[in-house]
């Protein structure tokens, strides 16, 4: 117990709640900060204290580091947990925390700085003898010189922002004629999004998979991995469904990629939780992508199969404790999958949606975890990230995990806002997903099929189900005689072998 100590959570929504619960379990009092629209939120009500960040825009509120530090002082806190997004990868903020005498729960500012640049981290990976995507990381010339460099890498190629994140700041270039213009506009975009115009070039892999490795280090030089997560189900270069273990790798590959992640982390003496991301080509070679020096959205699937509470681990490491776990104590048991529920319209290029939560039913049952901050009657604003909730299922094996997820998606009811629940379920039932053969562009193929099958005016199955449920019972749950409509018969899941 660390009685009398307080942790401030510089975030909102489900991740703020997640951190509040972990901190409380360790005996901490919790301090929430909130924008004006978030004044009555669940996270605010659950925290022991709450302070206002005047305004609504993120720059005035959750990115307002001066104001957050002033609140930290007033509240007399010990540490700040940044969650993910917002200030979580901001080394300047981590420095400012240290200057003001607060512990930043995450790796050191020095580590954040070195790994924060995709260019510098790529050089570190090379030094650690970890393969990187062929490309060019130096100062980019223009004109003929630029074309020469690009030709050597080969088309298609990808222009990336060194400081990029959240799937933003990337541009695919298919031919030389598009190169110059794409490079210049990528620079402008990088400058306005990330305040850093540095861009670099990478070979654009055609049908890759995204596999990442969870790492955890302490301030005493101990470092372990908690195995991989398969995150190839993406739209807009952003993850939609994640699972662990990866259905597409074997034990040897697992050992190699996890060892590579540790080699990168050792370059900087990584202390805290972090993720080393890789991309895997069709021939089965993996290449380093980047390191995320923070908690990851998809951390629950790792927690589900390893039994390690990653947020508590972050706090314990920040307290100065040595890792209580050795590598050989960490095993993958069973299989876990996460679906990200987004306020967005799959039928309209995944455009973020706004609305308010009308009816909400979040099932609770064995093997299911719902990380959410949704409440009936509350608005969902497009000012903030469109992720609404994370739905996690864990089973004895992949087949069981997917069946649990299917039932969860079927029974989860959210009315009042456009969301991707039906599309998630459709994706789960797709052949490539069932067979674990998907890559980062599979969602595009699945979407095309989905749009064709759904037809323009048919209500989404979950919507139809909810209406039937409400009409029949005045509450949630299937009405007598009403069967839940399904995107595909459940028997489609029967092909799985017990892994
Ligand atoms: P993860 O693998 O944890 O999902 P993401 O890259 O999707 O990582 O980012 C996690 C969250 O942080 C998302 O809500 C995303 O929108 C946000 N985010 C991450 N990096 C940035 C950034 N540089 N600028 C804006 N938002 C970001
Ligand atoms: P971010 O910081 O936005 O997460 P990443 O470098 O991790 O940026 O890339 C995000 C996603 O973009 C990857 O998961 C992958 O789908 C795609 N991507 C990144 N680099 C490449 C590449 N060289 N070839 C093909 N796809 C890529
Ligand atoms: Mg990434």
Image: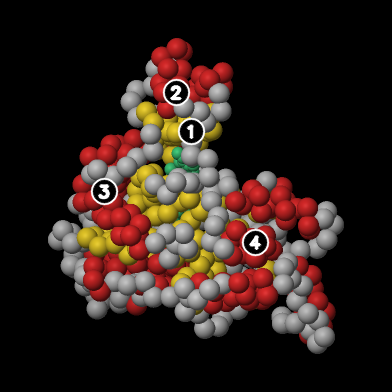
Disc number lying in front (1 or 2): 2
Q: Quadrant of residue 91?
A: top left
Q: Which residue is mark 3?
A: 264
Q: Characterize the local packing of mark 3: few (<14), some (14-19) or many (20 or more) Cα atoms within 10 angstroms.
A: many
Question: How far apart are the two marked residues, 1 and 4, measured between alpha carbons?
Answer: 28 Å
Residue 417, percent across and down? 70, 60
Q: Which residue is mark 1?
A: 158
Q: Is residue 162 above or below residue 388?
A: above
Q: Are marks 3 and 4 in contact (CB under 8 Å)?
A: no
Residue at image position (50%, 61%) is: 242
Among numbered discs 2 and 4, the one appearing first in the sequence: 2
Among numbered discs 2 and 3, the one appearing first in the sequence: 2
Disc number lying in front (1 or 4): 4
Q: Characterize the local packing of mark 1: few (<14), some (14-19) or many (20 or more) Cα atoms within 10 angstroms.
A: many
- The answer to whether residue 202 is left or right of residue 402 is left
Res 183 visible: yes
Q: Which residue is mark 4?
A: 430
Farthest residue to the right: give it: 457
SS of the residue under disc 1: strand
Q: Are marks 1 and 4 in contact (CB under 8 Å)?
A: no
Q: Is residue 153 above or below residue 264?
A: above
**Residue nearest the observer in this picture, 185 or 52:** 185
Residue at image position (30%, 75%) is: 26
Q: Which residue is mark 2?
A: 150
What's the image's color scheme? secondary structure
Among numbered discs 3 and 1, the one appearing first in the sequence: 1
């Amino acid at each position: 117990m660390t009685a009398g100590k307080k942790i401030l959570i510089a975030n909102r929504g489900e991740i703020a709640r997640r951190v509040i619960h972990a901190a409380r379990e360790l005996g901490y009092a919790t301090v929430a900060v909130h924008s004006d629209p978030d004044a009555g939120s669940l996270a605010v009500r659950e925290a022991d204290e709450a302070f206002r960040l005047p305004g609504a825009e993120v720059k005035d509120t959750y990115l307002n580091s001066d104001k957050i530090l002033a609140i930290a002082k007033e509240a007399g806190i010990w540490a700040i947990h940044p969650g993910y997004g917002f200030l979580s990868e901001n080394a300047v903020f981590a420095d400012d925390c240290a200057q003001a005498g607060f512990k930043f729960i995450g790796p050191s500012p020095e580590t954040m700085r070195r790994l924060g640049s995709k260019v510098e981290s790529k050089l570190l990976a090379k030094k650690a003898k970890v393969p990187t995507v062929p490309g060019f990381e130096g100062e980019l010339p223009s004109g003929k010189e630029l074309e020469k460099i690009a030709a050597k890498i080969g088309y298609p190629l990808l222009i990336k922002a060194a400081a990029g994140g959240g799937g933003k700041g990337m541009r695919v270039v298919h031919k030389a004629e598009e190169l110059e213009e794409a490079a210049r506009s990528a620079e402008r975009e990088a400058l306005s999004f990330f305040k850093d115009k540095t861009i670099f070039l990478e070979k654009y892999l055609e049908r890759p998979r995204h596999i990442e490795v969870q790492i955890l280090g302490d301030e005493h030089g101990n470092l372990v991995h908690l195995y991989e997560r398969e995150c190839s189900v993406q739209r807009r270069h952003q993850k939609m469904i994640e699972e662990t273990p990866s259905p597409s790798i074997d034990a040897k590959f697992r050992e190699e990629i996890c060892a590579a992640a540790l080699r990168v982390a050792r370059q900087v003496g990584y202390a805290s939780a972090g993720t080393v991301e890789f991309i895997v080509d069709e021939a089965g070679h993996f290449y380093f992508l980047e390191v995320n020096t923070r908690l990851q959205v998809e951390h629950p699937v790792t927690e589900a199969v390893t039994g390690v509470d990653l947020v508590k681990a972050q706090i314990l490491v920040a307290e100065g404790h040595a890792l209580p776990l050795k590598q050989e104590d960490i095993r993958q048991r069973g299989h876990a999958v996460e679906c990200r529920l987004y306020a967005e319209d799959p039928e309209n290029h995944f455009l973020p949606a706004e609305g308010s939560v009308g009816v909400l039913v979040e099932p609770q049952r064995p093997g299911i975890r719902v990380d959410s901050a949704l409440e009936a009657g509350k608005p969902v604003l497009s000012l903030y990230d469109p992720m609404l909730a994370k739905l996690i299922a864990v089973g004895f094996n992949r087949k069981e995990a997917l069946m649990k997820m299917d039932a969860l998606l079927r029974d989860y009811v959210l009315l009042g806002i456009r969301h991707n629940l039906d599309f998630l379920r459709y994706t789960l039932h797709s052949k490539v997903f069932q067979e674990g053969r998907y890559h980062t562009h599979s969602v595009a193929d699945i979407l095309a099929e989905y749009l064709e099958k759904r037809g323009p005016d048919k209500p989404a199955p979950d919507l139809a189900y909810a209406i039937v449920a409400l009409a029949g019972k005045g509450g949630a749950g299937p009405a007598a005689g009403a069967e839940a409509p399904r995107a595909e018969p459940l028997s489609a899941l029967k092909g799985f072998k017990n892994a």
